[in-house]
Image: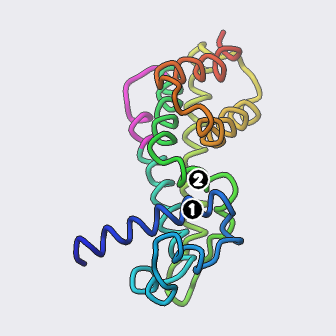
Amino acid sequence: MTLKSKNRQKEILARSARLFRKKGYAATSIRDIADAVGMKSASLYNHIKSKQDILQRLLLPIAKIYVTSIDRVNDSNLPAIKKLEQIIRDQIIITIENPDAVSLVPDQWFFLENNEAEKNNAYDAYIQLRNYYEKIFLKIFQEAIDEGDLKPVHIEIACFSILSTLRRLYSWFARHRTIDQKILEQELIMNLLGGLRT
């Protein structure tokens, strides 16, 4: 694949992510994507297989970024409460660097499909990555309770609240792009963990 072709694919993915964010996956057509990149619909297929292919190439990599990030934190020697703080920081960074792709995480993943004929189980792969991330997050949260840094709250409710806020951060950040990243990190850590600390 030539550099020009790779750059074209990146452009297609970036424009598609923006369209999926604004209109939703189902309401976005191949023609919409082609128009956004200044191509004819037929020419678009020289770079991508289908609209489903685009969605997979946006969602699966971002899910892997999340998993790589939380694995790195989990493998560190930090106390559990510091791990949770770092996870929040990492999610902020991922959101700032990939706002359109991250915007697909809360609502558009259920459009992913499994294709047994092509041995491509994108839906199952995404669910596995998401469930793994949540499992590690809950484990670290429980460790913070066991280490005495967090109150013995209902762990699943607390984690749902924290992760839901982080997954929707892209929407708030879109209207507050000038905020200093360090301030955002400090405030979110305080707001999401402050009331849970012992």
Vertical comparison of 71 with 2: above or below: above
Q: CA distance from mark 2 to mark 1?
A: 6 Å
Instruction: Identify the residue shown where x is 57% and y is 26%.
Output: 143
Vertical comparison of 43 with 145: above or below: below
Secondary element at image label 1? helix
Give the residue pinned by disc 2: 130
Span colored in magenta: 69-79
Instruction: Identify the residue shown where x is 39% and y is 86%.
Output: 46
**Quarter of the N terminus within the rendering:** bottom left
Q: Percent x, y for residue 80?
A: 51, 23
Q: Percent x, y for residue 70?
A: 46, 40
Q: Residues within 10 Å of mark 1 (few under 14, many from 20)?
A: many
Give the residue pinned by disc 1: 126
Side of 40 where 115 appears, left or right: right
| 73 magenta-colored | yes
**Quarter of the C terminus within the rendering:** top right
Residue 197: mark? none
* Residue 70 is at least partly visible in this image: no
| 53 magenta-colored | no
Q: Percent x, y for residue 51?
A: 56, 77
Could you say which quadrant of the image residue 168 lies in? Answer: top right
Colour scheme employed for the rendering of this structure: rainbow
Q: Are marks 2 and 1 in contact (CB under 8 Å)?
A: yes
Instruction: Identify the residue shown where x is 51% and y is 72%.
Output: 54
Type of residue at label 1? Answer: Tyr
Type of residue at label 2? Answer: Arg
